[in-house]
Image: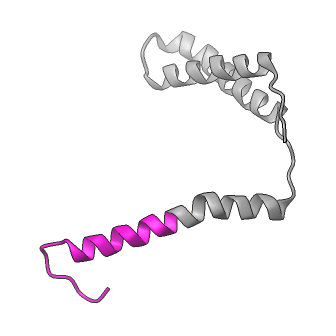
Amino acid sequence: MKTTRIDWIDRMKAVCILVVMLVHLEAGQALPRRLYEPFFLNGFLFASGYVYRQAVFSVFFRKKVRTLLVPWLVFSVGNLALSQLFSFQSHGNF
């Protein structure tokens, strides 16, 4: 499926998220930050919602399970198993 990008939306999202990241650095004066911080955060959320495409919930859910839950489960079980195998401390039952 070919998607077309809207240039001004991409630029708006880039500028807004950069300003939001700069605000998190807490550098600069407090008063100007209070004035532009909500504007750029709302601008980013607007731009993200502007291009949002509603998907069928079952397709969305299957994709999220496959891309988030399965890797999390594999790496978590692997991490637990490796910590039990290669630890020099005594452990109880797994």
Q: Is residue 25 above or below residue 77?
A: above
User: Which quadrant of the figure contains the N terminus?
Assistant: top right
Q: Residue furthest front?
A: 1
**The one of 63 and 35 positioned closer to us in this rendering:** 63
Q: Find the magenta span and give its range.
A: 72-94
Point out the image quarter for the C terminus: bottom left
Q: Position of residue 33 (x, y in %)?
A: 55, 15
> Can you say whether 10 is above or below 61 in the image?
above
Percent position of residue 51, x then y? 83, 33
Identify the residue at image location x=87%, y=48%: 54
- Kindly identify the residue that appears in the image at 64 percent across and 16 percent down: 15
Along the line of sight, the residue nearer the viewer: 9 or 16: 9
- Above or below, comparing residue 87 to residue 72 in the picture: below
Nearest the viewer among 2 and 71 is: 2
The chief SS type of the magenta part is: helix
Asked whether residue 91 is drawn in magenta, I would say: yes
Is 87 placed left or right of 54 in the picture? left
